[in-house]
């Protein structure tokens, strides 16, 4: 499986898994599709929205990890210093928590709808939590 459809707030994005670079992360997430949650604006990281996942354990370590995802890149932090989470960058991000800088596995990249990322970020910031759904395209 390589193609995804992501619906976040009123916006729709096409995306691809980065299976060659983060195979274990992609496999673990694919097994949970369709995946539905809420996104909220990040607190520490800059221009991004995130899905707090508490102590959910994907049973993965680090692979293809970064602290600086580009707009349209989605990372999964497997937990440890902070809670497990998924982050979608819509602008400049330095991934962090109140304890300091973190790194997450870049495992999904948006392939369409990038022009709506900033609007999604502003909507989450000013209007609160937004629904998000990941499903097979």
Image (cartoon, grey):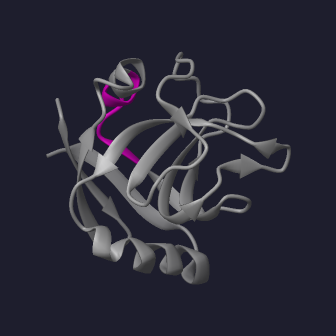
Indicate whether 63 appears above or below 127.
above
Toward which corner of the image does residue 77 lie, by quadrant?
Answer: top right
- Residue at left offset 56%, top offset 18%: 61
Q: Which residues are magenta?
A: 28-36
Toward which corner of the image does residue 110 lie, by quadrant?
Answer: bottom left
Expressed as whole percent of the image width and height from the top left, the position of residue 27 reads 33, 21
Asked if the stretch drawn in magenta spans residue 98, the answer is no
Horizontally, residue 107 falls left or right of residue 17, namely right
Asked if the stretch drawn in magenta spans residue 29, the answer is yes
- Residue at left offset 67%, top offset 58%: 45
**Residue 10 at least partly seen:** no
- Residue at left offset 25%, top offset 61%: 13
Expressed as whole percent of the image width and height from the top left, the position of residue 78 reads 59, 28
Expressed as whole percent of the image width and height from the top left, the position of residue 50 reads 56, 55
Toward which corner of the image does residue 117 lie, by quadrant?
Answer: bottom left
Horizontally, residue 30 falls left or right of residue 97, namely left
Quadrant into which the N terminus falls = top left
The residue positioned farthest toward the bottom in the image shown: 126
**Residue 7 at least partly seen:** yes
- Residue at left offset 81%, top offset 45%: 100
């Amino acid at each position: 499986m390589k193609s995804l459809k992501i619906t976040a707030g009123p916006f729709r994005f096409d995306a691809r898994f980065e299976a060659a670079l983060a195979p274990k992360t992609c496999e673990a997430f694919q097994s949970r599709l369709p995946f539905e949650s809420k996104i909220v604006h990040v607190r520490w990281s800059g221009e991004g929205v995130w899905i707090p996942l508490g102590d959910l354990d994907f049973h993965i370590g680090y692979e293809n990890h970064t602290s600086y995802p580009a707009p349209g890149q989605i990372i999964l932090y497997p937990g440890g210093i902070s809670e497990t989470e998924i982050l979608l960058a819509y602008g400049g991000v330095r991934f962090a928590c109140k304890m300091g800088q973190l790194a997450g596995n870049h495992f999904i990249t948006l392939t369409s709808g990038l022009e709506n990322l900033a609007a999604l970020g502003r909507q989450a910031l000013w209007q609160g939590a937004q629904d998000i759904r990941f499903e097979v395209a």
